[in-house]
Amino acid sequence: DAGVIQSPRHEVTEMGQEVTLRCKPISGHNSLFWYRQTMMRGLELLIYFNNNVPIDDSGMPEDRFSAKMPNASFSTLKIQPSEPRDSAVYFCASRSTSGGAYEQYFGPGTRLTVT
Amino acid sequence: AQKVTQAQTEISVVEKEDVTLDCVYETRDTTYYLFWYKQPPSGELVFLIRRNSFDEQNEISGRYSWNFQKSTSSFNFTITASQVVDSAVYFCALSLYNQGGKLIFGQGTELSVKP
């Protein structure tokens, strides 16, 4: 079975540009999470969705960040305009809440560099 | 507030040594889940184990074992007879039942196993 798929794997962009990160969760999973990993702050949750509905976006740094989940198999995280401090690895994770399983499975991450 | 502390930032051992990674968590909730994830040099996050707050049974999986003690709020991870392939950053994480599954990560312990 395919795991969580993220694209692109690497993104280099200039400050002020719009960046869109994409995620395809594991088929059948009904929860999707976006995390960011930096040296300074470690791994932190940005936003998560249950059944395509955003539940908690308190971790989104500011209005420059937005996330959507138009259907059960696709989500995007957009940064507009991007800034150098947004440079990080962005992970998408998914899980199924059926059957009592609560572990999240992570995608390979997108390494974002903003110059 | 919820918090996960991994006091060991870096550990270095020689192959075949046993090593224990410490994890201490804080929460006032009675229903929660604890996890360990492995992040090898390639960067992906790999799920290792989940434990719920009602199950204090220790678990062994091959060379890996986990010791969960609610009395000390600890969920320690031991690798027996370590191998070079165990070199990675290991993260302990906490998830509260009433918070939809969001993971609160510790800062991670970087394990280096030398031949």
Image (spheres, rainbow, N blue to C red):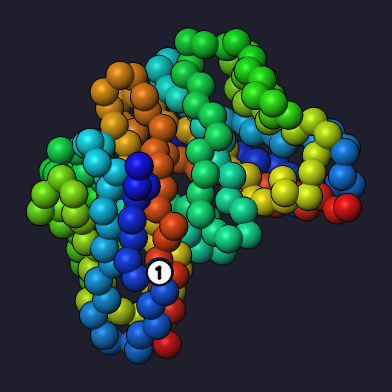
In percent of width and height, residue B78 lies at 73, 30
Q: Where is A56 relative to B62, above or below?
A: below
Q: Which residue is painted at 83% across and 34% down in the image? A: B81
Instruction: Give the percent coordinates (x, y) of residue A22.
Output: 26, 63
Front residue of this view, candidates B55 and A6: A6
Residue shown at 63% from the left, 59% from the top: B41
Q: Is residue B94 left or right of residue B101?
A: right
Mark yes or no: residue B95 visible.
yes
For badge 1, the amino acid type reads Arg
Residue B31 screen position, x and y as percent: 40, 17
Report whether A71 appears left or right of B74: left
Q: Quadrant of residue A77?
A: bottom left
Q: Chain ID for label 1? A: A
Q: Farthest residue in the left direction?
A: A70
Could you tell me which residue is drawn at 67 percent across and 51 percent down? B88
Viewer-nearest residue: B15 or B104: B15
In this rendering, the answer to whether A69 lies above or below A62 is: above
